[in-house]
Amino acid sequence: MFALTDLWRKRRLKALLLLGLLLVAQVAAAHSELRTSIPATGAVLMQAPEQIELHFNERAQLTALRLYRVGGEEIILPRRSIRAASNEVIPLPALSPGAYRAEWRIISADGHPAGGVISFRIEAPSRP
C-alpha cells in the first residue's frame, strides 16, 4: 500500500512539474509584437498621413522609429520621450508622393528587443 501511494505522489509531482514548465514556456514565448499600424504595411495612400500609429499587443518601449524615403533619404521625425505604452502616435512632417519605409524597434516588458518595417506608398493625386 505504501509503495502504491508513493508512486502516485511521484506521478502527481511529475505532472505538476511538467505543467509548470509548459506554462513558463508559454509566458517566455509571449514577447511584444506589433498588432496593427496606420498606415498598414503595404498601404497605398492617396494623401500623405499626418502621423504613424503603432499598436502593440502589450506595453513596450519604442526605442527607435526611423522613416526613409525609398532611395535612401531619411525623414527626420520629432524627438519624443521613451515610455512604456501599448499605443504610439508619432506626428509626421509633410510627405511628398513616393515610397516610404518606417523601421521601428522596441523593448518588450520582459526586456527582449523586437523590431520591424512598415512599407507604404503615397500616390500623387490624379488630374481630371
Image: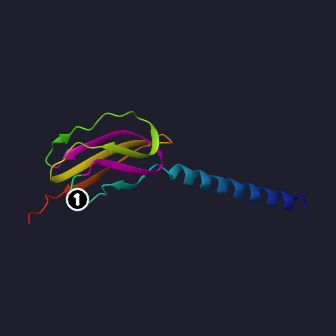
Magenta region, residue range: 49-70
Residue shown at 31%/57% (left/top)?
A: 40
Quadrant containing the C terminus is bottom left
Pick the front one: 54 or 111: 54
In this image, 29 relative to 14: left or right? Answer: left
Residue shown at 30%/51% (left/top)?
A: 117
Quadrant containing the N terminus is bottom right
Image-quadrant location for residue 10: bottom right
In this image, 95 relative to 14: left or right? Answer: left
| Residue 37 location (% of width, % of height) | 35, 54
Look at mark 1 in the image and give the residue it sits on.
45
Which amino acid is tagged 1? Leu
Pick the front one: 10 or 46: 46
Residue shown at 21%/51% (left/top)?
A: 100
By secondary structure, the bulk of the magenta-drawn segment is best described as: strand
| Residue 36 location (% of width, % of height) | 38, 56
In the current view of this chain or complex, which residue is farthest to the front?
128
| Residue 127 location (% of width, % of height) | 8, 63
| Residue 90 location (% of width, % of height) | 33, 43
In the current view of this chain or complex, which residue is farthest to the right?
1
Label 1: how many Cα within 10 Å (few below 14, some 14–19, many 20+)? some
In this image, 58 relative to 68: left or right? Answer: right
* Secondary structure state at the residue bearing disc 1: strand
Residue shown at 16%/49% (left/top)?
A: 70
